[in-house]
Image (cartoon, rainbow, N blue to C red):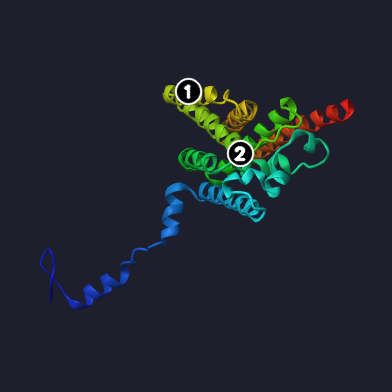
Amino acid sequence: MVPASVGFQCPECVREGQASVRAPRRGSGLQAVGRRWGAVTLSLIAVNVAMFLVTAISAGILGVSPVDNYLSPVFGALSQVPFLVDTGQWWRLFTAAFLHIGPVHLVLNMLALLVFGSELERQLGRWRFLAVYLLSALGGATAIQVLGEPGGAVAGASTAIYGLLGALGVLMLVRRQDIRGLVALLAINVFISFLPGVSLLGHLGGLVAGAVTAGVLVLTRRRPAMQVAGLILVAVVLLVLCVSASSVAVVGL
């Protein structure tokens, strides 16, 4: 007999009990990090960092300091310049959101993405969070395209990050949570957006697009098919605005 916490057990009973207990599964360190911060959030950060390294190396090859990565020809080919978008270079509407002007710009945006992105991914799930991020980036690009300076180059993930803040605000309102802290944070960041070299249009466009996208997700939360349709509609509206702005620009030429 084998001593137990209460009385005794026969050896056969102990072996059968041990065989029926499943050993706990231990995931890899990467899986644990992904669960903690969100797989999509970390993937977006990785893409942004990779794009910065590409532009920095490209600048270095030309003999320019890697810190001045915005002088890279790769950066010049991917940043948003409304006039060039009007001529058919549509990829700039999306690629600009994955570029950054210098390491400080990159670090600040990635820290914000890590904090707000992981929280929003946890609340919305992976694909819905990704939809909010991409549509927010497109919303910021649309505002720049419609109202921005035709020859000005714009880049950065701030458009998408402001969209995350807008989406988070909508979710907090729906849940009747205190949003005063978030409003104060937004007010500070909008004030900073008036500084020279910062795209106020991109930030506001991303903020509105993120809030609208979150609103669509909330209103259609019990109808997955309607969610997809609503997200597609938001994307179509933004693209139509870009096309309309391009048509006006072409006529103006």
Q: Quadrant of residue 250?
A: top right
Foreground: 161 or 80? 80
Q: Residues within 10 Å of mark 2 (few under 14, many from 20)?
A: many
Q: Position of residue 98 (x, y in %)?
A: 62, 44
Q: What percent of the width, then of the height, locates residue 34? A: 46, 53
Residue displayed at 48% across by 48% down: 38
Q: Secondary structure at mark 1?
A: helix
Q: Is residue 223 above or below residue 176?
A: below
* Nearest the eye: 181 or 9: 181
Image height check: is 212 above or below 39? above
| Residue drawn at the location 60% of the way across and 44% of the way down | 68
**Which residue in the structure is indicated by mark 1?**
183
At x 55%, y 50%, the residue is: 49
In the picture, the quarter occupied by the C terminus is top right
- Residue at mark 1 to residue at mark 2: CA–CA distance: 22 Å
Please state, as top left, top right, bottom left or bottom right, where the N terminus lies in the image: bottom left
Seen in the picture, residue 175 relative to 4 is either above or below; the reply is above
Q: Quadrant of residue 102?
A: top right
Residue type at mark 2? Gly
